[in-house]
Amino acid sequence: MAKNRKELIRETAISVMSELGFHDSTTDRIAQEAGMAVGTIYNYFRNKEEILEYIFQVEFAKRQQAYQAELASSRSALEKLSVLLETHFRAVGQDIAVGRILVREHPAPGGTEENQITLFLQGVPSLIQTLLDQAAEAGEIGPLDTELVAAAIFGAVQGVTFQAVFTESESKRKEILAAAPQGLMELFLNGLNR
């Protein structure tokens, strides 16, 4: 039951924070929307910051799981990267509210560096860098600064995700999310050259 309540709080917080933004969300509002007393939330989380961190923790775990599954596949490193992009954009399409939180919320200034938001924002590029290192070792790509390129790829993914989740048109959102994996891979592999 405890896990179910914790997940209910997370899911409700996603809905509330996606609609209002983190700063305008309150634990009272999350509790009200979840149909529970605010004290129940405090049995699982100290504050709304901890709820937000838990949202990022769960999303990073999902991406790590997809990454580990791809590492075990026989695909090339670049094919693995492409599959991870497809997985990300499909997940965003299935839960726009989570996508909004992932691109809008950042660690609080002066907060601890070891929080779940920072781990997400640094961890995903690290996963990408590992694939780029493998691609370089296999001769799929030329020598490059894989840390820098991984950060650029992550930034591009965040930018396209932002564009998709905040567009008003549902058809435009679907179009962006469907085109993003291939479009970004083409940009990464070919640059702006024709």
Image: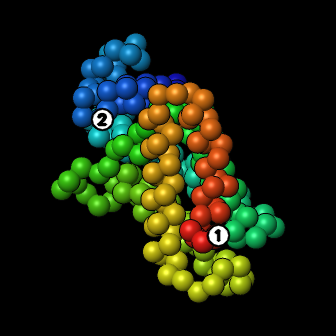
Name of the residue lying farthest toward the front: 194
Whole-angstrom CA distance, mark 1 to mark 2, is: 42 Å
Vertical placement of residue 149 versus 138, above or below: above
Q: Looking at the picture, how far across and down is residue 26, in whole percent?
A: 26, 26
Q: How many marks?
A: 2
Which corner quadrant of the image does residue 190 belong to?
bottom right
- What secondary structure is marked by label 2? loop
Q: How is the image coloured?
A: rainbow
As shown in the figure, which amino acid type bears the numbered disc 1? Arg
Residue tagged by mark 1?
Answer: 194
Q: Are marks 1 and 2 in contact (CB under 8 Å)?
A: no
Residue tagged by mark 2?
Answer: 22
Q: Residue at x 62, y 38 (%)?
A: 175
Q: Is residue 119 left or right of residue 42?
A: right
Which corner quadrant of the image does residue 93 belong to?
top right
As shown in the figure, which amino acid type bears the numbered disc 2? Phe
Q: Residue at x 46, y 42 (%)?
A: 163
Q: Residues within 10 Å of mark 2 (few under 14, many from 20)?
A: some
Q: Which mark is residue 50?
A: none
The answer, for residue 84, to whether it is visible in the render is: no
